[in-house]
C-alpha cells in the first residue's frame, strides 16, 4: 500500500532563534534527516514538506528536491499542518512526521505501517512514559479529514493533538512493541530550544 508522506516543518521557531527545520545535525538539516528516514522506511511515491506560510521554506524545498505546501489555516499549530497534509493527499492513508524528531528511525516508521488495519483510523506510537506521539503517525484520510475540518471550522481553542487521535479508533503501538529497536529510548527526543539542540548533538553516534 502506497502512502503519501508529509514532513511538518511549521513556522519560525522563536525559542530556537532560527528555523529549526534547517538546523544542521550530524551533517544534515532536521528536514533532510526526516526526509531520508521516511524514504528509507517507505520508499513513498511522494514526500511533501508542510510549512506555515513563508516563501523561504519553498526556496529550501527546491534545494532539497522536495515539494512544499503551506497551511490553509494559519496559526493553528500542528493541527493546521495535519489539515494541509490531509487535503493534499492522493492516497487513502498518509504518514505524518514532525521534523523536530531527529532520531525517529526508518525501522519504527516501518513497524507503525505494519499495524495499519481496517479497524483503525490512525496508527501511532506511545512512549515509555505513556505519552502518545501523534506527529509520528499514519492517518486514514477519509476518517481523519472530517474530524480535523470540524475542529478547524469551530472558533474555539484547538484541542491537543492526542485528544483528536482518540476520535479515530487508534491503534496505539506500545513502547514494549518497539523497545527492541536501536535507540528506542531516544526516538522521540524533541528539539524546541537551543539546549535541546545541543543535547541532541551530543547524543549523536561518534
Image: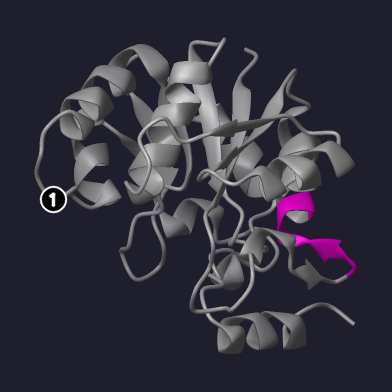
Residue at image position (67%, 68%) is 183
Q: Quadrant of the N terminus?
A: top right
Q: Quadrant of the C terminus?
A: bottom right
User: Does residue 141 appear left or right of residue 56 in this picture?
Assistant: left
Category of crowding for the residue at label 1, using alpha-carbon neighbours closer than 10 angstroms: few (below 14), some (14–19), many (at least 20): few
Look at the image and name its color scheme. Answer: one colour
Residue 173 makes an appearance in the image: no
Does residue 31 belong to the magenta stretch?
yes
The residue indicated by pointer 1 is 157
In the rendered view, tell whether residue 198 sits above or below residue 99: below
Is 145 in front, or is 137?
Answer: 145
Q: Which residues are magenta?
A: 27-32
Residue 84 makes an appearance in the image: yes
Quarter residue 23 falls in: bottom right
Does residue 47 belong to the magenta stretch?
no
Residue at image position (49%, 74%) is 14
- The location of residue 184, given as percent across then percent down, is 60, 65
- The location of residue 181, given as percent across then percent down, is 65, 58
Is 95 in front, or is 67?
Answer: 67
Quarter residue 153 falls in: top left
In the rendered view, tell whether residue 37 sits above or below residue 140: below
- The location of residue 89, given as percent across then percent down, is 53, 16
- The location of residue 109, given as percent across then percent down, is 62, 41
In the rendered view, tell whether residue 174 sits above or below residue 152: below
In the rendered view, tell whether residue 6 sits above or below residue 177: above
Residue at image position (59%, 47%) is 54
User: Does residue 147 appear left or right of residue 172 in this picture?
Assistant: left
Quarter residue 59 falls in: top right
Amino acid at each position: 500500500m502506497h502512502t503519501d508522506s508529509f514532513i511538518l516543518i511549521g513556522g519560525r521557531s522563536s525559542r530556537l532563534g532560527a528555523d529549526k527545520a534547517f538546523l544542521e545535525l550530524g551533517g544534515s538539516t532536521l528536514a533532510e534527516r526526516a526526509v531520508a528516514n521516511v524514504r528509507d522506511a517507505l520508499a513513498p511515491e511522494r514526500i511533501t514538506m508542510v510549512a506555515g506560510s513563508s516563501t523561504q521554506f519553498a526556496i529550501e524545498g527546491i534545494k532539497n528536491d522536495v515539494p512544499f505546501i503551506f497551511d490553509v489555516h494559519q496559526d493553528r499549530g500542528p493541527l493546521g499542518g495535519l489539515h494541509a497534509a490531509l487535503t493534499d493527499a492522493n492516497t487513502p492513508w498518509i504518514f505524518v512526521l514532525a521534523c523536530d524528531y531527529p532520531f525517529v528511525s526508518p525501522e519504527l516508521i516501518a513497524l507503525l505501517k505494519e499495524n495499519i488495519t481496517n479497524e483503525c483510523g490512525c496508527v501511532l506510537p506511545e512512549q515509555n512514559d505513556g505519552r502518545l506521539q501523534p506527529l509520528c503517525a499514519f492517518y486514514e484520510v477519509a476518517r481523519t479529514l472530517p474530524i480535523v475540518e470540524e475542529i478547524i471550522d469551530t472558533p474555539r481553542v484547538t484541542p491537543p493533538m492526542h485528544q483528536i487521535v482518540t476520535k479515530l479508533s487508534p491503534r496505539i503501538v506500545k513502547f514494549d512493541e518497539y523497545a527492541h529497536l536501536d535507540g528506542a529510548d531516544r526516538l522521540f527526543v524533541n528539539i524546541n530550544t537551543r539546549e535541546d539542540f545541543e543535547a541532541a548533538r551530543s547524543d549523536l553516534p561518534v
